[in-house]
Image: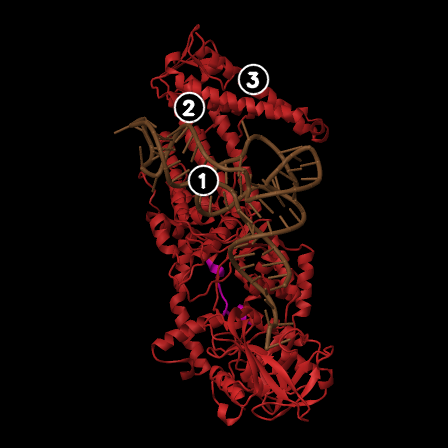
Chain colours: A red, B brown
RNA sequence: GGGCGCUUAGCUCAGCUGGCUAGAGCACCUCGUUUACACCGAGGGGGUCGGGGGUUCGAAUCCCUCAGCGCCCACCA
């Protein structure tokens, strides 16, 4: 049972986790109260990064805390197939072998990626265990599990039936490298320096010309009109006329539309419905045809021979050159504008006209906004809710079709003889189906990953009939990073409300990012990524957890700080040594019967244990993880180790030491699960129980009045330490005369202040202590005390200044009149206390400066 | 162009609905082999709370304004 001097986490952690997992403590236990968290599923194919350590830490602390409260806790782990993300990783993998996605059918590709992901999936499950997450592995869910796919389909079907799904030829954000469309939210915009080209469009009747300004001259072959603002006097006479498109001589109408900004460019705009979102809308309003001149590979098509098959970039160059040589180019201006890029490969996103599935978001958003405004979901921090509402209010329809293989096939089939005839059917393994003699062809596309993951809360719990759903929905908490507030949290709320008629979770906690040590963003390409596993190996899982939550509040980005991890390790070691000491003192069979506080230190530590535990609980109820840890840290380190254990050495109360140790291990367990459980398993008097399965117990109460006596001891001890330090003296004795309180606590004072002795004498003189009302003095004479007199003078100055300040407050009539009585009487008390202390200080100075 | 947020000790950050002499950790300085722990113990120095104005008896905290920084959204042809 003798424990090593230093806690070495990697000797114990794996065994402890295995013990937990085997015992089944992580499965929800019976209780009237439920607490449920479904973990955001990380990409099954990728290693867990430091950000997920934060998620794991926060969710696990909450889960373990609620378990300690005796609630039925569900912490459900999962993994995401991460459709496009994973496919693009796999494509890179293929590229290394000199292959590409075009070498395989969709089915082949799907199967290959499935195998690829299966290889890597167990990695991250192992990593979650290393992080100590107390999740219920029996409920582990993958986003391609049947129960998830089934619910993606039923949600889609419901929307289909209720008219929220529509198929339409719309402009989508298309990445020509990856060959798929994206939702608006997946496009990243960057400001880029480019040009604004001014091009002459002559009127057909020869009566003049219009000059248009454009950033994309190569799309002019797709122009189907030129628009001006109806209120623009310069162009009123042009409206209704026809211009000739340079380089092709096709004729275009001049029309009026409010969207045109008179101040921008020339106030005349070429309209290209097939390649610009604004123009598309103008086209819709004016029933213009759309001419697609850029294909899905980013090449020019349906354009004059000279430009055919050129890339957008080359096409642009040639068009500009030709316009210039044919004198259609009026001028070229430098122009800064923001350009959409593929968030994965950086390719410029082409707005292309594609036939895709869209969700009409208006009704969904409306309901979500109402729920948010009604405060049905509490946000940490509150400001994220405001942002979310703003986002929902400007929401566009959602394109859920993706042209990739790695995803859930869209259960829709098209009549081969009638393109407008689409039906819903779940036989997605068939490419062709026959119904009523008609032949239907499956839509080759898959769902946007976010479509299925938006059903995560109710799908994982198996809506609508399972026990889990009835018990754990809505979830207690959704904890996640700020980057997926819009793509995920917002959609879970919308779909949750739509499908279950309930909010999917009652609280949302948004954590900030873990940045690199210098505060910049972690990124693989920069090479400043911190991998959690080596850190766990070196410092321990608890140390990393504590280091990562320490000083971090909701939604605030902060750098990873190795020193905080070291602090965490030190804290674990402190706990370890506290246990080591107590276990040595109490032995294998401590007498635990009739355990009660005896010394004033006993009362004091019990009172503080109660108070600290209450405060920590209150913080955790509000997800103030760092504050809670801070309180735990100081209680254990300062109160327990530095004061109580030291004080107890003069009169150890074995039963109480055991009780305090157990109570502390319980409170600390959510923060440092491994070390607390490891210690628990070393307790000779505990057999076979798991700390992870314990609950907060009724603590033995201390007497508050007796506790106050210990703070008196602390004051005396602190002053003696200060004096001894200031005077650099040793072997000091403290004297007093006939004082029961001092007599009773002489041993404690002697030990804590490292005195030679504490002695009761009839009378005598020396240096009086000023911090206590008890008459005690040290055997230090005037000649040795000069340094301390300087300290006393400083105290006197400080004390006088304080009194002056407080008195000024009281002489201020409006303060006395306006401030609450409580505050005023508090001030009076402060003055009286300060004056008492000042008197003692002054007297002491006098004693040492006179005669 | 909008929205959200930040600026407090050398560093990283706490400071709730205004009221104890503005806090913590790390770093720094001094001392210490007191057998639980040097991943330790004791003591200490260090801040005109970004600038300016206002409300108030009282402002780090509320309001206005200026400056700097960050993030998000947006259909600037």
Pick whichever, A565 or A58, lies toward us.
A565
**Magenta-tinted stretch:** A137-149
Q: Nearer the viewer, residue A83 or A10?
A: A83
Mark nearer the viewer, 1 or 2:
2
Helix, strand or loop status at disc 1: helix
Q: Chain of mark 3?
A: A
Q: Which residue is mark 1?
A: A665
* Residue A280 marker: none
In which quarter of the view is residue A578 placed?
top left
- Report whether A634 appears left or right of A504: left
Label 3: which secondary element: helix
Q: Position of residue A555 (x, y in %)?
A: 54, 53
**Left or right for A629, reference A754:** right
- Where residue A722 is drawn, which disc sits there? 2
Q: Which residue is mark 3?
A: A836
Separation of marks 3 and 1 at Cα, in angstroms: 42 Å
């Amino acid at each position: 049972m003798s424990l090593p001097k230093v806690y070495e986490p990697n000797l114990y952690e794996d065994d402890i986790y295995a013990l937990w997992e085997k015992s089944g403590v992580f499965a929800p236990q019976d209780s009237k109260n439920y607490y449920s968290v479904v973990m955001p599923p990380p990409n099954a194919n990728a290693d867990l990064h430091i950000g997920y350590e934060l998620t794991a830490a926060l969710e696990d602390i909450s889960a373990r805390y609620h378990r300690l409260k005796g609630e039925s806790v569900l912490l459900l782990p999962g993994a995401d197939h991460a459709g496009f993300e994973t496919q693009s990783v796999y494509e890179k993998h293929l590229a290394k072998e000199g292959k590409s996605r075009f070498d395989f059918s969709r089915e082949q590709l799907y199967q290959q990626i499935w195998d690829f992901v299966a290889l890597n999936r167990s990695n991250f499950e192992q990593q979650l265990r290393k992080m100590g997450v107390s999740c219920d592995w029996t409920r582990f869910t993958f986003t391609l599990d049947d129960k998830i796919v089934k619910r993606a389909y039923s949600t889609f079907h419901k929307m289909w039936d209720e008219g929220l799904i529509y198929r339409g030829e719309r402009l989508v954000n298309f990445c020509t490298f990856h060959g798929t469309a994206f939702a608006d939210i997946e496009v990243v915009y960057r400001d880029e320096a480019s040009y604004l080209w001014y091009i002459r469009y002559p009127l057909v009747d020869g009566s003049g010309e219009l000059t248009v300004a454009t950033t994309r001259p190569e799309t002019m072959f797709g122009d189907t009109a030129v628009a001006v603002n109806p209120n623009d006097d310069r162009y009123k006479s042009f409206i209704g006329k026809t211009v000739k498109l340079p380089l092709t001589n096709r004729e275009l109408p001049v029309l009026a539309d409010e969207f045109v900004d008179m101040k921008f460019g020339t106030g005349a705009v070429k309209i290209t419905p097939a390649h610009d979102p604004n123009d598309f809308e103008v086209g819709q309003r004016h029933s213009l045809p759309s001419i697609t001149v850029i294909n899905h590979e980013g090449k020019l098509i349906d354009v004059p021979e000279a430009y055919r098959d050129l890339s957008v970039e080359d096409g642009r160059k040639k068009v500009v050159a030709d316009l210039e040589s044919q004198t259609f180019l009026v001028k070229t201006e430098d122009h800064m504008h923001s350009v959409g890029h593929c968030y994965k490969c950086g390719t410029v996103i082409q707005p292309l006209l594609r036939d895709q599935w869209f969700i009409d978001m208006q009704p969904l958003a409306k309901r979500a906004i109402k729920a948010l405004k009604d405060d049905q979901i509490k946000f940490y921090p509150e400001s994220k809710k405001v942002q979310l509402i703003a986002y929902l209010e400007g929401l566009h329809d959602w394109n859920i079709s993706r042209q990739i293989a790695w995803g859930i096939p869209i259960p829709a089939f098209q009549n081969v003889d009638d393109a407008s005839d689409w039906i819903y059917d779940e036989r997605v393994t068939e490419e062709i189906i026959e119904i009523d003699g008609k032949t239907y062809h499956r839509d080759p596309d898959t769902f946007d990953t976010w479509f299925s993951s938006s059903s995560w809360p109710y799908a994982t719990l198996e809506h609508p009939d399972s026990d889990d759903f009835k018990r754990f929905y809505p979830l207690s908490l959704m904890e996640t990073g700020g980057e997926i507030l819009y793509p995920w949290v917002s959609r879970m709320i919308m779909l949750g409300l739509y499908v279950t008629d309930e909010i999917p979770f009652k609280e949302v906690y948004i954590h900030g990012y873990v940045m690199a040590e210098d505060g910049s963003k972690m990124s693989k390409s920069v090479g400043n990524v911190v991998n959690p596993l080596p850190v766990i190996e070196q410092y321990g899982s608890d140390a990393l957890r504590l280091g990562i939550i320490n000083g971090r509040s909701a939604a605030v980005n902060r750098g990873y700080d190795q020193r905080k991890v070291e602090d965490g390790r030190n804290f674990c070691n402190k706990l370890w040594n506290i246990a080591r000491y107590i276990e040595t003192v109490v032995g294998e069979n401590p007498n635990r019967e009739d355990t009660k506080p005896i010394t004033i230190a006993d009362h004091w530590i019990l009172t503080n244990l109660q108070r600290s535990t209450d405060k920590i609980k209150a913080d955790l109820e509000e997800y103030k993880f760092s504050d809670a840890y801070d309180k735990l840290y100081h209680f254990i380190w300062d109160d327990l180790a530095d004061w109580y254990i030291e004080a107890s050495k003069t009169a150890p109360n074995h039963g109480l030491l055991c009780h305090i140790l157990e109570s502390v291990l319980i409170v600390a367990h959510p923060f440092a699960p491994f070390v607390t459980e490891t210690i628990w398993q070393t307790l000779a008097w505990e057999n076979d129980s798991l700390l992870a399965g314990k609950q907060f117990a009724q603590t033995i109460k201390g007497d508050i009045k007796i506790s106050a006596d210990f703070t008196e001891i602390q004051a005396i001890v602190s002053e003696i330490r200060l004096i001894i330090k200031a005077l650099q003296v040793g072997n000091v004795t403290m004297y007093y005369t006939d004082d029961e309180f001092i007599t009773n606590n002489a041993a404690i004072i002697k030990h804590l202040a490292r005195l030679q002795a504490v002695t009761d004498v009839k009378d005598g003189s020396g240096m009086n202590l000023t911090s206590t009302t008890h008459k005690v003095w040290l055997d230090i004479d005037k000649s040795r005390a000069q340094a301390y007199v300087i300290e006393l003078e400083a105290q006197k100055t400080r004390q006088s200044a304080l009194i002056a300040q407080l008195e000024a407050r009281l002489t201020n009539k409006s303060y006395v009149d306006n401030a609450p009585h409580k505050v005023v009487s508090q001030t009076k008390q402060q003055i009286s206390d300060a004056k008492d202390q000042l008197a003692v200080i002054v007297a002491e100075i006098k004693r040492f400066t006179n005669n």
